[in-house]
Amino acid sequence: MFRACQLKLQELVLESDTREYPDRRTDEIRTIIVIDSIKNPYESMYLKARYNNYYLIGIYTEESERRKRLREDEHMVDDDINALDIIEQNSAFKREIKQYEKWRKAGENPEDCPTPYIIRKMYEQFQEHQLLDDLSFISPFILQNVSSCLDSADILINNRPDDRSYTYLKQTLLRYVCLIMNPGLVLPTAIERCMQTAMTAKLNSGCISRQVGAVVTDDAYHLLSIGWNQQPEGQLPCSYRDLCELYHHWCPEGYSDYENDDKGLLQTHIKTQVEDFFDTDDCPLRAHGKLPCYCFKDYHNQINEERNQVHTRALHAEETAFLSLGANHLRAENGILFTTSSPCELCSKKAMHLGIKTIYYVEPYAGVSEKHVLSIGERKKRPQLILFTGAIGTAYNRLYTPLLPRKDENEMWLGAKMGARLMEQIEKKRARKEPADSVKRRCVPHAHG
């Protein structure tokens, strides 16, 4: 449909411009397509695979500012905002659906249920189309997941408070539109360069829940250390740890004494899982050649009915970056921390101890680190927490890699190499063209006849 409309538009433009621009070609008419509000990461994945010049731009802002705008501009109350947040997060939506299902099975009055009305209506639709049993399988592909879209965004823009004309937002968008049209037009910012290093570092993480990268620089953006969330040196990453391997003791050195204890709580709880499911041909992971890798923290917390973050095996990305500073720890004072996820309470305290003055982050991490740990003491000494703006991932490479080396591009447009004899080469070129141009000018009739 778009291509048909584009061809028609080209015909109309050329028809109206024929007299004024007799040599104009259809391929000179360029079009940029903007799709608003993509909220499922697999929609974006399809478009990225289908169209080479596709970029996902994530425009986000601080949580407090977002809620303020929804209240003031959209006239939404807190209950509506909370319902919106649940719908836009796949995991939160599934939890709410399960809670509502328990409520219904308990025979309670649906009208007294705390589940938001819109989610109850969505539950009824899933039930009507017999999708509830398969919800965990199909939900990633049919439900909204805004946070995952931001995780996969090519360009992130902090839509911070702006003037009435949205000058900052327009300038930022203009920068990246120009880079899309002409890769390598400008150099990356120092902030982009450092965050890209953190983004690359996070790929080294073997965490099966969330990969995080971190970079520490001095106040002039000179790199001091990098880190990612990982287990202590010499231990297997969680992505390589196999529940069946643990149960059968195929590699006891890869697991702790607590995990290997046959009389312990963990072995007792995984016995039935392994024997009746993971070790059978009915296990979907086995059918697809996947390891039943597991998170020790999740199992330990469920066994003890608690939600404790202390039991995680991994050091946080910020911790490994801080530990890697070595003699550079003095240069980190008044320095900058770049992290793909805002620091937790423990890492925030370490950052303050080192004298970090600015923290750039992409994904907000739940907790009270900003309001509690980072917001204490003299205001001028408090670290500043800033939501990141810039290109990341593969888009960073695509936007900042010129299609041609700049010197070769200049030669292409000028028709001659730039150097001491540039004008001499251009004059020779003009001289060769002049006779043909004169004949052409004589052949073109004047407008007045």
Image: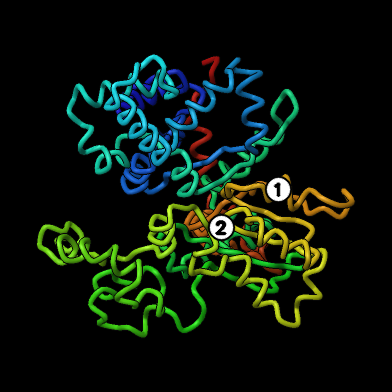
Residue at screen point 67% across, 72% down: 322
Q: Pick out the residue farthest to the front.
A: 263
Q: Position of residue 363 (x, y in %)?
A: 56, 49
For residue 197, say whether it is visible.
no
- The label on residue 39 is none
Quarter holding the N terminus is top left
Q: In the displayed image of the protein, which residue is found farthest to the left?
A: 281
Point out residue 209 in the picture as x, y percentages from the top left corner. Answer: 43, 57
Q: Residues within 10 Å of mark 1 (few under 14, many from 20)?
A: some
Which one is nearer the viewer's eye here, 281 or 197? 281
Which is more foreground, mark 1 or mark 2? 1
Query: Residue at (52%, 78%) from the top-left corner?
Result: 232
Q: Quadrant of residue 93?
A: top left
Which disc number belongs to residue 400? Answer: 2
Q: Nearer the viewer, residue 142 or 418?
A: 142
Residue flagged by tag 2: what amino acid is it?
Answer: Tyr
Percent coordinates x, y for residue 319 in the rendering: 63, 69
Identify residue for label 1: 370
Q: Earlier in the sequence, mark 1 or mark 2?
A: 1
Q: Amino acid at mark 1?
A: Glu
> Marks 1 and 2, how far apart in space?
33 Å
- Residue 63 coordinates in the image, percent (x, y): 63, 36
Q: In screen coordinates, is 168 left or right of 27?
A: right
Q: Is residue 366 above or below residue 331?
A: above
